[in-house]
Amino acid sequence: MNADVKLYDYWRSSASYRVRIALNSLDIIYERVPVDLLKAEHKGRENIARNPQGLVPTLVLGDKILTQSLAIIEYLNETHPDAGFLPESPLGRQRVRALSYAIAMEIHPICNMNVAAHVVSLTGDGDVARGDWMRKFISEGLMSVELMLDHSETGAFCHGDTPGMADFCLVPQIYNAKRWGVELGNLPRVNEITERCNELPAFVAAHPDQVK
């Protein structure tokens, strides 16, 4: 482990999963420090001192404290010249960001654990309401991503033939979709890319089942 690099995360957090993939892709050795969301450790004083939003992940690099998964991934891309998480061209970077944001800023926030718990508290329908909510918004969001992937720049991965930030977002979202029983049969491009990613060591090692 690298004592200067610590990742505070939760094993099943999609945002944490993204950052684990990015770190693994760069062969960065890091110490993983679990923050148990089910025990509300993310809302505790220690986590808020690191992450004022009371969220995960938080990446600590020596005296630097980084939050927000996509901002962390872009930082890693900028500080590692050969990372290739985003394309070199401005138009390519725009497309990868658009795909990433479609997942991380459109699907993920409304399916966040706190949001789903609030829906349950308002409806009183418990797990039925939670499951219906998750399936509706994950399904609709992934269908939009599928349509976005109908593009000449889509290759073996979301953009071209090298996995990048959009793939780092897609794979955790598919893991979450399966967890909630979302129908994925109508997403051929999404499924092909996800299967290809899940054969790569960086993705395999970041999988929740490998770190819980």
Image (cartoon, rainbow, N blue to C red):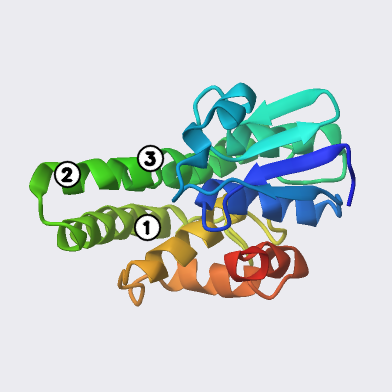
Label 2 belongs to which residue? 121
Q: At 43% from the left edge and 52% from the top edge, which residue is drawn?
A: 148
Q: CA distance from mark 2 to mark 3?
A: 17 Å
Residue 48 picture quarter: top right
Residue 57 shows in this picture: yes
Which callout, 2 or 3, points to the residue nearer the camera?
A: 2
Instruction: Name the amino acid, label 1.
Output: Leu
Mark nearer the N terminus (2 vs 1): 2
Dot 1: element: helix
Query: In this view of the protein, which residue sits in the foreground, 83 or 30?
Result: 30
Type of amino acid at the residue the image marks with label 3: Pro
Residue 83 x %, y %: 81, 46
- Earlier in the chain: of badge 3 and badge 1, it is 3
Q: Nearer the viewer, mark 2 or mark 1?
A: 2
Image disc number at residue 109:
3
Mark nearer the viewer, 3 or 1: 3
Q: Is residue 86 visible?
A: no
Number of numbered labels in the structure image: 3
Task: Determine crowd level at label 1: few under 14, some 14-19, many 20+ residues with C-alpha closer than 10 A.
Answer: many
Packing grade of label 3 (10 A; few <14, some 14-19, many >=20) is few
Task: Measuring from the top left, give residue 120's x and y in whole percent.
Answer: 18, 49
Q: Amino acid at mark 2?
A: Ser
Q: CA distance from mark 3 to mark 1?
A: 14 Å
In the rendered image, which residue does mark 1 sit on? 142
Question: From the viewer's perspective, is 54 left or right of 20?
Answer: left
